[in-house]
Amino acid sequence: MDKSKIMSILKSVAIILVIVCFVAFLRFQAADLSVIPADQQSYYKDASGLPYFTEMDSYYNLRMTENFLEYGHMGDTIKNGTPWDTLSYAPEGRSAEYKPMIVYVTSFLYYISNIFSDVSLKEVAFFVSAIVAPLAAIPAFIIVRRLTNNYGGATAALIVALAPNYFAHTFAGFFDTDMFNVVLPLFLVLFFIESIRSSKLAYRIVYILLTIITMVLFSLAWDGYVFYIGMLVIFMIVYLLLGFILKLDLIKPRKNYSNLLSWFTDQKEIFSIVLIAIIGFIGLGLTNGFDSIIQAPMNLLGATQIQSAANAAAYPNVFISVAELQIPSLLTGGISGAFSANSGGIINGVGGIVAIFGAFFILILFAQRLWKLRSFNARGVNKKPPKGQRKATSKLKESKSRDSLIESTLSDIKTIEDVNRNKRETLLYLVLFSVWIFLSAVAVTQGSRFIMVLMIPLGLCVGLFVGYAVVYIKNKIDSKSKLMAIAIIGTFLIVYPIFQTFSVFYPLFNISSTLAFIIPIIIVFALIGISALLIYGFKGFKSSKFAKTAVMLILMFAIVSPTVFGAYQVSESVVPSTSDPMWDSMLWVKANTTNDTTLASWWDFGYLFEIASERPTLFDGGSQTGIRAFWTGKAMTTNDTELSAAIFEMLAFSGDKATELLDNYTGNNSQKSVEILENTLTLPKEEAKTTMINSYNLTSDQADNVVNLTHPDEPVPVIFVASSDMLQKAGWWTYFGNWDFNSKSSTGYQYLIAQQPAKLEDIGNGLYQANITNLEENGILFKTVVTKSIDNNTTNATTAAVFENGTPVKTQDNTTFNPFTVNRLVIIEDNMLVQNETVNESGNYTLLVMGDNGTYTSVIMSKELENAMFTKLFILGGFGQNSFEMVHMDDGISLWKISGYNTLRNETGSTNSSN
């Protein structure tokens, strides 16, 4: 290995280290909570000063890691030989068998960090994603660098490691398995490719073993590992098939070898595939169980049916409400959005339209190159170069290793060996990226979370494009005007994301909006000016030999700029998913309720409830069944709070068993099962049994079996957690609670809460008015207008839609536009109900106005929610019902127990009997 080779390797290593540190720095920066004013940041930090996690799955992963360190297994107990989590999906609990890689890695880092310092497990968990995810830059760089140059490798590393959908799930404070879902696939593909490309048998065996190890590790990190195994299998089938069609001699004749073993070891593709298949099957079987491997193909096929499965069951499927499983749009933000990187659309998810163009350009380039090589046969080349041009074998191998596939041209082909090598490698990468992109695109049709899968091959192709473009500029473009044109276009592509960043985040930089506009302009002129100086020269300053280098750098930064600044914007916008009131409320539950108390609420905060309160929860992010979603939604949506309490009582005591049992008795007529329960849950036990027998034709034994599940002799204490975030989520929990079993569809309803209270202002003629904004959308303000007359001391209110300047919004026929027409008006002033009447029979919304000493707030709600349980408890503070009692309240949080049941420690005077 000569000096230039060593320097090339050292340069690549230095670039990788810089990129890894840079992308890690951006992720660590999320912990600063920069977007939150300094005087409010403590509200989003725990007692140790560490910010709360950014999403709820983090708390489940943290609890499983705590369990592992405390008990040696995940979950808090062992049930029939299976690790079991008693806090999730009460009352049964659920299996704690879980992909353990995140637990293993976090535990390892916890032990290592505590060798040098006293660090809590929560601190390690908080930062582990920011440590692991940047490693994706390493294989991305190597894969692309082998085919192009450092420019291409650096581009791929940045595009992949900072891809919006990946970055948004792997910054500090986001503790989830997504950190592995780019790192491990890239290493898997890298090692697999090298196991095929390497000439030396020893190297191939090493890469085969590394491929298998990576595959096994990936199987311990994410169920989706089967996608990549399937992708590699399909890739190899297509690759071998096309190799046969194109007569590439991928499989050599057996007759040319003395024995079968020597033939087998010389078949690069077959040798690698067979060994990986055999040893990989054994490795996966030992770590995951052989049954899971046999079922893997069906699991992979089932993954393509997520959307159809979401609409197939009798009960509503909660997955349709999960944002990551919504089908993504192709592009967000219109024309300007095409040059932005964010997680809103497919094109945005890989760095914008320019990056997408580059990725597909490189596929076309590979296809074009393969077509030309197809007719480039032995007749046009020599078996050996002329004697005077021959090199020593060591020099020849070294030369070939330096010639990247992208940089080489047909004129570089001198021997038959060169022809075959170019054909094989061109076909290999064309098929690999084509199959990878196609299958990933299919996956994206099942939800936006799979954009992360698609961006990996596209990001690599973007890097290849930059590598090719750099070579093209270096070797083909000598025109100064063309170089300048590239520099100008590249400069604008670089600066546009900078302009977007400054226009939004200028307050964080302590500069004015004017200066935020001027700075990007200065950068434009500076880059163009420097480029012109290097390209054209100026008065004694000759054009520089670095002119092309400058243009190549501008090109590279033009491609990565949207992704880099998109990641920066995310890191500067992080707000934890919870705050002190919610956490403190759970600590109150832990300190003041009996150990058997069960928490009921919508599923989003379930994981937090479990780790903070150490109490079982009815519903969380890992127990999203249709039955549980329906009944929880029904409890919050119904006008009958007695039914709400009875639903929670049933779920806390027997879970889904009563519903499942009735489904069995009614022949899976879920509508009838639900009807039976709705009409009997609030009745005394014996009366409920009689109703089941007389009205629904159940036998006495069947009715006994059901009421023993729905009307427990000793009910489980329940705390219902109502929180302000559930107002925005009402569209979903009302959708599930109003499920129509015949049409298998539903309608969701909504609350529009005042953004902030408004005071009455004198508008003349004895009238005072308060304008309350409930919603701002597309430049239109949807308001509540409260008018008070001093003369007769009356208050009235209505809704209005106005532009930001106060002008009423009109339709095309010049009529007033107002989508929130009021059906019923409810006004409460100084804790007294002063008006409750229907004002418009055709209206679809109820307007609730609450005033206190001249300051008003309001809620515009779908009229169906006017008397809903959640409205009565959270918005009206329990007014109009006797089924629940508030036991604790904090900012935006209220806790309710079922009336008459002993729920709090040392509580007396209540009964826990439902008879």
Image (spheres, rainbow, N blue to C red):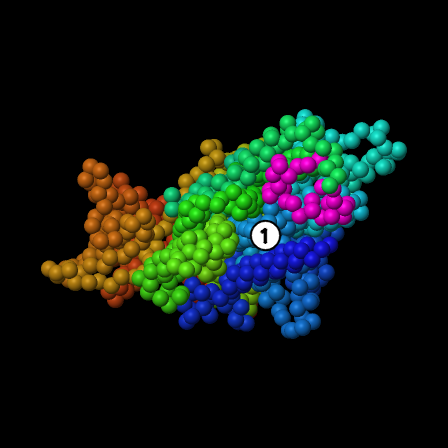
Q: Is residue 476 visible?
A: yes
Is residue 101 on the magenta stretch? no
Given residues 494 and 334, the one toward you in this image is 494
Q: How many marks?
A: 1
Q: In this picture, is 670 found above or below 38?
A: above
Question: In the image, what residue occupies the spot 78% across and 38% down?
Answer: 271
Q: Give how far across and how far down residue 264 sits, in percent.
A: 82, 36
Q: Give how far across and how far down residue 444 sits, in percent.
A: 53, 40
Task: Please give left or right for residue 527 compared with residue 391 in the image.
Answer: left
Is residue 391 on the magenta stretch? yes
Q: Residue furthest top?
A: 245
> Label 1 is placed on what type of residue?
Asn
Question: In the image, what residue occupies the spot 75% across and 39% down?
Answer: 387
Given residues 791 and 117, the one toward you in this image is 117
Task: Please give left or right for residue 848 compared with residue 530 in the image.
Answer: left
Dot 1 falls on a residue whose secondary structure is helix
Specify start and end residues of the magenta stretch as a single range: 389-417
Q: Is residue 90 visible?
A: no
**Residue carrying label 1:** 150
Task: Please give left or right for residue 145 compared with residue 520 in the image.
Answer: right
Given residues 261 and 75, the one toward you in this image is 261
Q: Give how far across and how far down residue 20 sits, in percent.
A: 59, 59
